[in-house]
Amino acid sequence: MRVAFQTGADVTEESSREHELNNPNYTVNPLLQGLFRRGIDRFFHYSTHSLENGQGISSAGYWVTLSNLDRTGRFHMDYSQAVENLEGFDIIFVRGDDVDQTTEERVQLIDSLENVILINGGKATLVTRDKGEIPHRFVGDEDLIPRTINVSSSQDLIKAWEEIPGPYIVLKGRYGFGGKEVERFERTREGHNQ
């Protein structure tokens, strides 16, 4: 079975690889453990930034071979660089870790693949990562999410400051998550001036 994963990890950099792929407390490692226990010890790690539509949907990435699963849930990982046509895979996991404004169109290329099981398609991943989409998806159910205002001008920012209740305001970049592109401002004169 040919399996591909997209994550934000840099496979060649040990600390990134260990945190993003080999951390038993992080979402990718438990998935890899499940595959490994079913005899799948090799997967293709690709980047949304390198997705291309030429003769099929292809991506640069790394083949990662898993071995020696230890008692803590960590693997030994070997990797080799490759370019692969994704149409030849059985299962593709689209996580969205590297989805941003520069990869919007590329991530949706995944949806055109046929005869591939997609775990999160490109469009699904995009709308869950794009903070600008959230208010549109919850029209009529606004009480299910924090008060959200899309800000594209200084007037929008003033409106948000006036209308959003609470002791602080959180500004997120369109694809901000996990502390990246996320800022919190206290409702004080100093916070307002920032």
Image: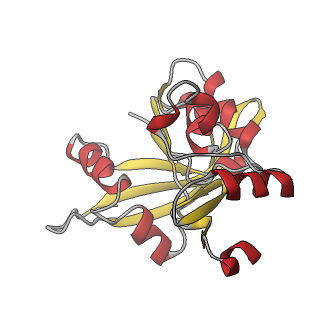
Q: Position of residue 52 (x, y in %)?
A: 75, 39
Task: Indicate whether 174 appears above or below 55.
Answer: below
Residue at the bottom extreme of this rendering: 190
State the quadrant of the N terminus: top left
Q: Residue at x 55, y 39 (%)?
A: 128
Q: Is residue 104 left or right of residue 172?
A: right
State the quadrant of the C terminus: bottom right
Residue 188 lies in what quarter of the image?
A: bottom right
Q: Position of residue 20 (x, y in %)?
A: 44, 63
Residue at the top extreme of this rendering: 115
Residue at the left extreme of this rendering: 71
Please state the total of marks drawn on the protein image.
0
Q: Is residue 159 left or right of residue 116?
A: right
Task: Indicate whether 45 appears above or below 55.
Answer: below
Q: Residue at x 41, y 69 (%)?
A: 19
Q: Residue at x 29, y 65 (%)?
A: 75
Q: Position of residue 161 (x, y in %)?
A: 69, 59
Q: Residue at x 46, y 68 (%)?
A: 17
Task: Indicate whether 191 appears above or below 182.
Answer: below
Q: Is residue 120 left or right of residue 34?
A: right
Along the viewing direction, whichever of 44 and 119 lies nearer the viewer: 119
Along the viewing direction, whichever of 139 and 11 lies nearer the viewer: 139
The image's colouring method is secondary structure
Residue 23 lies in what quarter of the image?
A: bottom left
Task: Indicate whether 86 appears above or below 184.
Answer: above
Q: Is residue 31 left or right of residue 101?
A: left
Q: Position of residue 131 (x, y in %)?
A: 63, 45
